[in-house]
């Protein structure tokens, strides 16, 4: 099986692109790193087919084999108690509010055992900013998970959670991460990034860590040998230039640490939140995804987001720079609370990937293929 390379070439005049776009496209095809002005030209001015062609070209340079990867995991929200009150969040509950919870070991056991029975290899563990749990609660949870399921990959806690704990427990971020790692933490998800631009964050999540603090937590995690992902949630109260600020901030951090395994952008889901905007349409998502692939030349993997965009757009994203289909997502609660409820079985994911001309491969967090690949 082969995949056609990008049909775009500088001689193509069908797109009738502005000179700045043509120059930026030529830089991409020459393997050169995009600067801010070139990224702006592509993001603001390029036709969508041009972006698709360029991003797919770069994707094939990085991943020439006809493979699309995915991970089988479950997102377990250990608590929905949070004092941040982010305006974009429909999931959290204030302390002592009706519907607030903290997961029991019995419920956690049931969820993990079900995940393993479905061929899952990883648990993504995240919660809110709980003001009264002792730090030992998190350490004990990790130790129990590690002892009970030694082969389970624990992909847990976001930079905002870690930064919040450093203030709550009067500990350094470095000490927080070291203790979590000693207790069994394997890697850190890129949640809580939203838009890495501090003024925007002050509008939509004023009680959460700043962009600089988010990046600092990730740098420290990478320094201690933990791999992480990076994310972007866009389409709320930011401007397009802030999305580029985000991409270049992630790229700069990756230049320093090489610790990010993947970048995952998704669109804000506004239902039941305190931000009243229309959801981003598919072309806006695909445009941002393609530009992410072009700017983030030092991050190998770009994930599509079927959870927010649905299976058809996620499949199309495989030709806009994405080489990974994200997660089987056995459970997801935060996006669902905002009214987005797409659901796929493993067989659906395999069928979607194959229909696009690729071979599905289940992977680990570090993008190694799992042994005994499932057949669907």
Image (cartoon, rainbow, N blue to C red):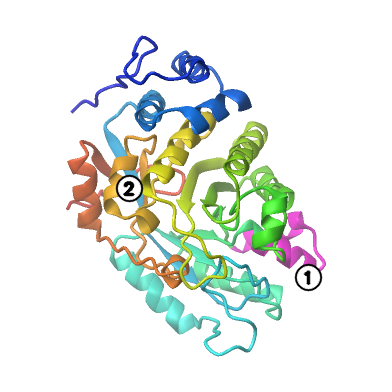
Whether residue 181 is in magenta: the answer is: yes
Mark 2: few/some/many CA within 10 Å (<14, 14-19, 20+): many
Residue 82: x, y in percent? 63, 75
- Horizontal side, residue 291 vs residue 346: left or right: right
- Horizontal side, residue 166 vs residue 144: left or right: right
Which disc number belongs to residue 314?
2
Between the residue at mark 2 and the residue at mark 1, the CA separation in whole angstroms equals 41 Å
Say which quarter of the image contains residue 53: top left
Q: Quadrant of the N terminus?
A: top left
Residue 125: x, y in percent? 51, 65
Helix, strand or loop at mark 1? loop
For the stretch drawn in magenta, the main secondary structure is helix
Q: According to the image, label 1 marks what residue?
A: 169
Residue 194 vertical placement versus 147 (above, below):
above
- Residue 363 seen in the current view: no
Residue located at (57% from left, 73% from top)? 141
Task: Identify the residue at the far right of this view.
Answer: 170
Residue stretch in magenta: 161-183
């Amino acid at each position: 099986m082969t995949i056609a390379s990008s049909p775009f070439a500088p001689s193509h005049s069908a797109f009738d692109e502005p000179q700045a776009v043509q120059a930026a496209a030529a830089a991409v095809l020459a393997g050169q790193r995009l600067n801010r002005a070139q990224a702006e030209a592509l993001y603001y001015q390029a036709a969508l087919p041009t972006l698709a062609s360029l991003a797919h070209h770069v994707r094939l340079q990085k991943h020439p084999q006809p493979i699309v990867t995915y991970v089988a995991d479950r997102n377990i929200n250990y608590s929905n108690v949070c004092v941040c009150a982010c305006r974009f969040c429909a999931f959290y509950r204030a302390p002592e509010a009706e519907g607030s919870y903290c997961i029991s070991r019995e419920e956690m056991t049931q969820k993990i055992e079900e995940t393993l029975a479905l061929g899952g290899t990883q648990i993504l563990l995240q919660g809110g900013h709980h003001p009264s749990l002792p730090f030992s609660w998190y350490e004990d949870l990790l130790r129990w998970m590690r002892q009970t399921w030694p082969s389970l990959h624990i992909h847990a806690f976001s930079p905002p959670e870690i930064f919040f704990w450093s203030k709550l427990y009067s500990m350094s971020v470095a000490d927080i991460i070291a203790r979590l790692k000693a207790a069994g933490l394997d890697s850190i998800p890129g949640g809580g990034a939203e838009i890495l631009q501090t003024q925007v964050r002050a509008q939509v999540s004023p009680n959460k860590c700043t962009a600089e603090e988010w990046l600092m937590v990730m740098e420290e995690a990478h320094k201690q040998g933990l791999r992480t992902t990076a994310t972007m949630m866009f389409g709320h109260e930011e401007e397009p230039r802030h999305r580029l600020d985000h991409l270049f901030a992630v790229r700069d951090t990756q230049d320093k640490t090489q610790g990010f395994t993947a970048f995952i952008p998704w669109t804000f889901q506004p239902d039941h939140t305190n931000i009243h905007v229309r959801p981003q349409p598919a072309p806006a998502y695909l445009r941002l995804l393609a530009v992410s692939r072009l700017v983030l030349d030092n991050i190998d993997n770009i994930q599509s987001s079927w959870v927010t965009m649905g299976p058809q757009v996620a499949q199309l994203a495989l030709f806009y720079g994405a080489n990974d289909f994200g997660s089987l997502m056995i459970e997801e609660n935060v996006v669902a609370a905002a009214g987005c409820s797409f659901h796929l079985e493993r067989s659906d994911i395999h069928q979607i990937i194959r229909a696009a001309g690729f071979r599905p491969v289940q992977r680990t967090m570090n993008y190694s293929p799992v042994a005994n690949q499932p057949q669907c």
